[in-house]
Amino acid sequence: MERILLLLFSFIVEAIVFGLYSFRLFFSAYSLKRTTLSIALAHSFLFLISLGGINWLNTIAYFGCSILLLTILFKVQTSTALFHSTILTAIMGISELTLLVFMNKYDPSFLTESSMSLFFYTIFSKLFFFIIIYLLTHIFKKNKDTASNPADYFLVAIPAASIFIIFVFLSICKVPYYSGTINILIVIGTILLL
């Protein structure tokens, strides 16, 4: 059940990130309500596919779904949709892989310990994915007439700093001589950072 909830959370975040990326860079061919509903339905379909647990199928399905969504819902040519779907899929994979490699170097038994480790991995990888896409959408805005506000880039520092602080909290929780009360307070502080 925990795995299903984490997958559901992952696909909700991926749908939000896809919407952020698409609406920021392209002009929608339909109304906001219709486009948002279509993105949600497509990511629900991807969620159902992911329940099978086949990673390569999930990646191919996400890539293909991204191409279809960009081509159908936005005023985008197929070659542009292919390019941006490749970017989204690659960044999603890189964010998960980078975090997996970093966490295995930091703690080799990271994903084998408990479902809490999987929870932290899911939160961090999706937050990392969001940060990268957020930066990309500010670099490649669709409306070049509006000037980019430099303060927008400082907003990215907030989730990046919270990732660092959460890693510190996670390492503190692994120290065996702290009491359960301190660990509970640390977990509450971590949740409040999110």
Image (spheres, grey):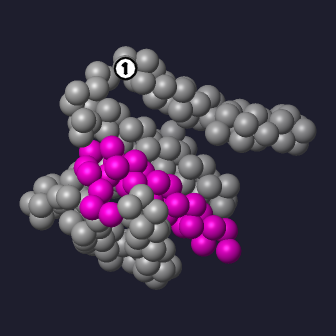
Q: Is residue 82 left or right of residue 68?
A: left
Q: In the image as oriented, which residue stretches furthest toward the top?
A: 150
- Please state, as top left, top right, bottom left or bottom right, where the C terminus lies in the image: top right
Residue 171: quarter of image = top right
Q: Which residue is mark 1?
A: 149
Residue in the foreground of this view, choosing between 3 and 24: 24
Residue in the foreground of this view, choosing between 107 and 19: 19
Q: Is residue 116 visible?
A: yes
**Magenta residues, start to end:** 1-30
* Pointer 1 local density, CA inside 10 Å: few below 14, some 14–19, many at least 20: few
Q: Is residue 111 visible?
A: no
Q: Is residue 157 above or below residue 82?
A: above
User: Residue 188 placed where, x, y %?
Assistant: 79, 39
Give the residue displayed 71% in from the left and 41% down from the top. Answer: 191
Look at the numbered disc 1 and give the secondary structure of its residue. loop
Q: Is residue 110 left or right of residue 125?
A: right
Residue 4: quarter of image = bottom right
User: Residue 123 placed where, x, y %?
Assistant: 56, 49
Give the residue displayed 54% in from the left and 26% down from the top. Answer: 158
- Please state, as top left, top right, bottom left or bottom right, where the N terminus lies in the image: bottom right
Does the magenta stretch mainly form a helix, a strand or a loop? helix
Residue 176 is covered by the magenta coloring:
no
